[in-house]
Amino acid sequence: MNRLLEKVITAHGGLRNWDGVGTANATATVTGLFRHEHSSATPSQVNVQTHQNRVTIEPLGCPDCVSHLDHDHLSVVRKDGTIVIGLEDFGLRFEPPIGLATGVLMTCRTLRSMLTSPFLLTDEAVEISELVPWNERGAQWRVLRAEFPPDLSAPARVQDYFFDAEFLLRRHDYHVDGAQGITVCEIVADYVDVQGLRMPTKLKGYARRPDLAPDFGRELISVDLSRLAFS
């Protein structure tokens, strides 16, 4: 394992604790451009199968909808069984207003990543390399670049992870949907210790500017987690 990644994993609770859980559950308040106008404004219940690349969020997509992302298959189903969305390997559109499918998919991916990072980087199929440090308000954040294989569901093949002096994840960047897409810059904060695992409970996702800094005027998603538990 990459030496920096070893320190990162230890700082977040270690593989022994991570391998001992299979599910993450939390209540999430989600706002921002990815939250479609027809979605419920009430907090959602989130269930992530931590080692299976699956996430279920209820409600999401509509007030009585359950959204489920299993690898790259997205489904949005009403409680009466009506299928609202059933898609796999589809293109995304980020021109405003952002459509329902794009918003739901990006929300699912964000929460799945938030509740499995940085441990997902330990997969043997993920190639890890360290980039030059990033200067953040006078502090240096070390950066790991992860290259995901095509058969491992991920929002982008190449993703960058930024870690502070305590080796905690602070930022996550990735580009989605090719030349016409968008580069997302996610900032995470407010760590809690849950069953020996250290995880962030707040996330702000912004479009990234050409100078690699987040564009704070373009908030794509905001996540506030509570009642986080692993089993």
Image (tube, grey):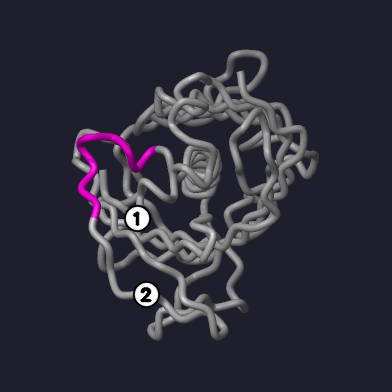
Picture layout, residue 7 above or below residue 78: below
For image coordinates 65% across by 58% down, the residue present is 189
Query: Which of the two residues, 74 or 113, is positioned nearer the viewer here?
Result: 113
Structural crowding at the residue carrying mark 1, measured as other residues with C-alpha within 10 Å and reported as few (<14), some (14–19) or many (≥20): some
Residue 206 visible in the shown view: yes
Name the residue that disc number 1 marks. 4
Question: Between marks 1 and 2, how big is the CA–CA gap?
Answer: 12 Å
Does residue 37 appear in the picture of this structure?
no
**Does residue 75 lie above or below 163 as drawn?**
above
The three-letter amino acid code for the residue at tag 2 is Pro
Q: Quadrant of residue 89?
A: top left
Residue drawn 61% across and 30% down?
57
Q: Residue furthest top?
A: 80
Q: Secondary structure at mark 2?
A: strand
Indicate which disc residue 133 carries.
2
- Name the mark on residue 128: none
Crowd around label 2: few <14 · some 14–19 · many ≥20 (10 Å): some
Q: Position of residue 28 (x, y in %)?
A: 71, 40
